Image: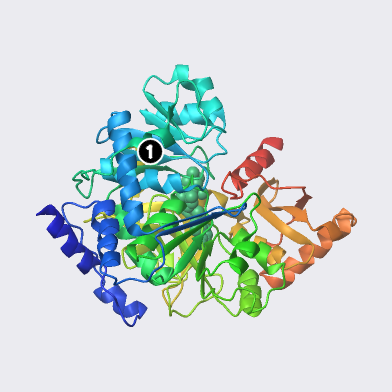
Amino acid sequence: IVSQRSLQLCSRCYPVHASWSYEAIKQQYRLEVPEYFNFARDVLDRWTEVEKEGKKSKNPALWWVDGAGEEVKWSFEELGVLSRKVSNVLSDACGLQWGDRVILILPRIPEWWLVNVACMRTGTVLIPGTQQLTAKDILHRLQKSKAKCIITDESVAPAVDSVEAECQSLKFKLLVSEGHREGWLNFKDLLKNASSDHHCVTTKCQDPMAIYFTSGTTGSPKMTQHSHSSYGIGLTVSGRYWLDLTSSDIFWNTSDTGWAKSAWSSIFSPWIQGACVFVHKMPHFDPHISLSRFPITVFCSPPTAYRMLVQHKLSSYTFKSLRHCVSAGEPINPDVMEEWKAQTGLDIHEGYGQTETVLICGNFKGMKIKPGSMGKPSPEYDVKIIDENSNILPPGKEGDIAIRVKPTRSPFLFTCYADDPEKTEATLRGDFYVTGDRGIMDEDGYFWFVGRADDVINSAGYRIGPFEVESALAEHPAVVESAVVSSPDPIRGEVVKAFIVLTPDYALHDPEKMMKELQDHVKKVTAPYKYPRKMEFVEQLPKTISGKIRRNELRQKEWRKD
Ligand code: ATP
Ligand code: MG
């Protein structure tokens, strides 16, 4: 009965809309959330059926290539068989049970996808982590999460061994490698001998599915718990109308396997649509190679890759198959969007969201794009700009970007910060979940990012968002990138200070003259009161592992100094 209900849900949840208009979808689109849902069974196994009936394109579910010419292509059926085997490894060899937590730290290798799906099938709670974690980070995550099992490769295994004695909950270590290591079970050996018969557990929609750590841009990364239905159903709109995917697409998302963004865009959004997930494991990240060599049709990346790519002076013939591009994770500078359009003929559809949410705002397919804006709210959420007393602010007024959670909290929002009710509670204000980001909604209902609440500068009564100043600086040929923060000032309270990385051609210029030139430039391209009164030229900016600028680190240094 459960399965029947879920299949009905699939066809209701994932209807094919021939035409699309934002207003129509906003009015009509209601994702239904049933009592039971499991993405592996209700979506992936359903695609296997469609594939067997010959009703979908011949593209694989997963297409993986590496720099050495190795290649893996799995249909949905093969993905099903292999992930069932991995499920048996987790249940039998490791004795893991529903609700047990599993940390997964692997590079972009096919096994990463198998473990993701196997955790859904077994009801174990997946906690992905990036390869760049240190032994101290791993200790912190193992202790905080009380994970029972860790799955990783030999590059990370020594770090795990060095802290294991302090992690009482850890019972199983699985090594994904051709080689063996003492104290570790070998994943590949176990997989070879595992049966492909596995009965997917029955999961309720609100049962925990995964815990994703936030990027740690503003402090310690938070353990964000999501249910089976949140990303699994909630990313439908994102897959269809932001990424514009169908089962004929080959979709490349560049995120590291350690972040929620890879769940969003390398698992749920594309597979809801039956699209092919393309993965390129490269020794050095070079998106130009991937986009020109492979028939990628849809591309998703943070702004930094676009900044890199436009340096190549592309033409519309360079990436023959590419037809749709999206950016997320940080604001994308309007001049990069313009450059990209001029060189490739394609728009960049910016999206905005958090580990805690599905897509909050997006420049959806067919919508007019206003460069610099994050687009309009996703139909899943009622998004508003609110003040400190949770009053809704009118268009044009800056405030906190918030999602309505009363009377009903969206099932597509995180369940909680795992094991931390106080932190969870602190995200609520009145009827809203507060994102921690500041923004403005314009008269047309488009949202504009001002900055993270802590990053906004208040200088002599003027509120200044760092992103606008950074974008103005980026338009000058001397600037590679910059971070704008507040700095103490005896008269104004605080002033705008820019930390700037210069291009090699300008690095040796006289700093005084360079500063004057950049200040004049900012005054010309944006409202003059925003210009940085202080400047420091630096070799690099402090960033999170996922590449986001850590303005709070620079700001703290400024305020400590004086
Ligand atoms: P932490 O919460 O640990 O400080 P984080 O907020 O960077 O880290 P994520 O959940 O990965 O962790 O990132 C979500 C945040 O990224 C958003 O709250 C917002 O500040 C920023 N962001 C994402 N997309 C955009 C975008 N298109 N424009 C501007 N900012 C964005
Ligand atoms: Mg955050």
Q: Position of residue 443 (x, y in %)?
A: 43, 77
Above or below, 81 against 529 in this view is: above
Mark 1 vs ligand 1: CB below 8 Å:
no
Q: Which residue is mark 1?
A: 192
Q: Kindly identify the residue that appears in the image at 32 percent across and 37 percent down.
A: 194
Q: Kindly identify the residue that appears in the image at 50 percent across and 37 percent down.
A: 220
In this view, the residue in front, 342 or 531, is 342
In this view, the residue in front, 463 or 553, is 553
In the picture as drawn, the residue positioned furthest to the top comes out as 165
The way the protein has been coloured in the rendering is rainbow
- The tally of labels here is 1
Q: Position of residue 540 (x, y in %)?
A: 73, 47
Q: Is residue 448 visible?
A: yes
> Going by the image, does 391 lie left or right of 229?
right
Q: Position of residue 404 (x, y in %)?
A: 30, 58
Q: Quadrant of the N terminus?
A: bottom left
> Going by the image, does 427 lie left or right of 326?
left
Q: Quadrant of the C terminus?
A: top right
Q: Position of residue 445 (x, y in %)?
A: 41, 74
In the picture as drawn, the residue positioned furthest to the front comes out as 193
Q: Kindly identify the residue that appears in the image at 59 percent across and 61 percent down.
A: 303
Above or below, 414 against 153 in this view is: below
> Going by the image, does 203 lie left or right of 65?
left
Q: Is residue 419 visible?
A: no
Q: Kindly identify the residue that appears in the image at 41 percent across and 62 percent down.
A: 60
- Mark 1: give few (<14), some (14-19) or many (20+) Cα within 10 Å: few
Q: Secondary structure at mark 1?
A: helix
Above or below, 406 against 95 in this view is: below
In this view, the residue in front, 93 or 120, is 93
> Going by the image, does 221 lie left or right of 269?
right
Q: Which amino acid is tagged 1?
A: Lys
